[in-house]
Image (spheres, rainbow, N blue to C red):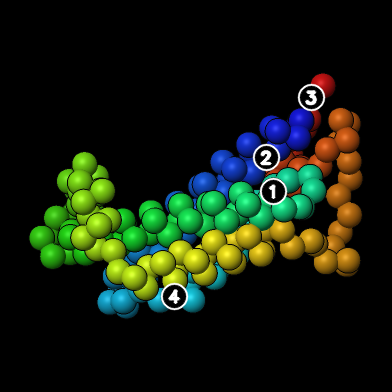
Amino acid sequence: MRHVEIYAFAAVLGLLTACAVAIGWAAIAVAAGMRIGYMAIGAAFAIAFVVRHSVDRVDSSTGVLSAALALVKCVLGNFLTACALFSRDTGAPPMDGVLRLLPHSEDLRTRTFRPIDLVYYGIGVYAGYRYGRKPMKAGAPVRQRAADGMTCGWARASGLRTVK
């Protein structure tokens, strides 16, 4: 795999992780009846962990990718929280709430926005950047190089082989 392909792979895995974490964020926020700010740190850590372990080297670009995906997670999590609250209040199924509110997402975002959201977004972006560019510990196992000189922990763990 070339360097660009590995970062695209990391971006796709990070986006899937961001979506899963946003669903969890929304479920916890609805169950607790409030948004919990420190969840942004844990969610950003999960995204950064996936991105960091999907690339061949950890540098500032993995931090930027993790931070961007953490911001996507925050925005998507707030939207899904609003959809879940709408579904709960109207008695509609959750997917019906998402489909009914999706065309009005811009209006929904402005109506449900609170200034504290900027703090959550900032915490998520900072944690994503910080954990995304943090190098691996010295005691971490050394990965073997693939035939083209690149490594990809997720591809190797799943048994995928690089083809020249």
- Find the distance from the CA under tag 1 to the CA under tag 3: 25 Å
**Label 1 neighbourhood size at 10 Å, few (<14), some (14-19), many (20+)?**
some
| x, y percent for residue 109 | 27, 56
The answer, for residue 49, to whether it is visible in the render is: no
Q: Residue furthest top?
A: 164
Disc 3 secondary structure class: loop
Give the number of callouts: 4
Relative to residue 151, is residue 20 drawn left or right? left
Separation of disc 1 and disc 2 at Cα?
9 Å
Determine which residue is flagged by label 1. Answer: 61
Of marks 1 and 3, which one's residue comes earlier in the chain? 1
Q: In this picture, is 111 found above or below 104?
A: below
Q: Which residue is mark 3?
A: 163
Mark 3 vs mark 4, foreground winner is: 4
Q: CA distance from mark 3 to mark 4?
A: 44 Å
Q: Mark 3 or 2, which is nearer the eye?
A: 2
Vertical placement of 112 versus 99: above or below? below
Q: Is residue 15 left or right of residue 144?
A: left
Residue depicted at x 37% and y 73%? 116
Mark in front: 4 vs 1 = 1
| Residue at 86% in and 59% down | 141
- Residue at mark 4 to residue at mark 1: CA–CA distance: 25 Å
Tag 4: amino acid? Gly
Residue occupying image coordinates x 56% and y 41% = 12
Which residue does the numbered mark 2 point to in the structure image? 7
Q: Residue at x 74, y 63 (%)?
A: 134
Most foreground residue, 60 or 58:
60
To which residue does mark 4 refer?
37
Mark 1 in CB contact with mark 2 (< 8 angstroms): yes
Q: Secondary structure at mark 4?
A: loop
- Mark 3 / mark 2, whichever is N-terminal: 2
